[in-house]
Amino acid sequence: MTINLKKIYQRKKTMEISKLYFDMVDLKATIDAHKLQDTKRVHDGTDNEDTIGDLIDDLIEGIKELAHE
């Protein structure tokens, strides 16, 4: 029996990405439930045009893209 380390690594990576994705989905639901999605994002100590709702949506999309690589 041969151990395919590449398959094991890929499976572990997929599981980690899945956990990150579902944590982000939970975080988005929490932000939405508390009506915080329109709160301005602070970056380097200053406000900018993006909101935390935008930020979490971008993170979720990024994780989806990683999952398909």
Image (cartoon, rainbow, N blue to C red):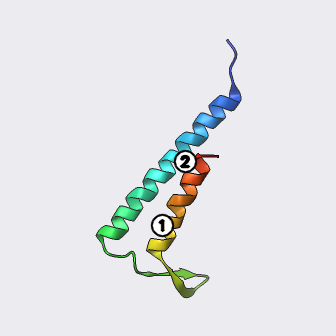
Instruction: Establish if 11 lies above or below 68.
Output: above
Whole-percent x, y for residue 11 in the image: 59, 34
Residue pointed to by mark 1: 56
Circle 2 packing at 10 Å, graded few (<14), some (14-19), many (20+), is some
Q: Quadrant of the N terminus?
A: top right
The kind of secondary structure element at disc 1 is helix
Label number found at residue 12: none
Which badge, 1 or 2, comes first in the chain's sequence? 2
Residue at x-position 59% and y-position 53%: 65
Q: Is residue 1 left or right of residue 31?
A: right
Whole-percent x, y for residue 3 in the image: 68, 20
Residue pointed to by mark 2: 17
The kind of secondary structure element at disc 2 is helix
Residue at x-position 63% and y-position 36%: 10
Instruction: Report the amino acid beneath label 1.
Output: Ile
Instruction: Establish if 3 lies above or below 37.
Output: above
Residue at x-position 55% and y-position 47%: 17
Instruction: Report the amino acid beneath label 2.
Output: Ile
Q: Quadrant of residue 43?
A: bottom right
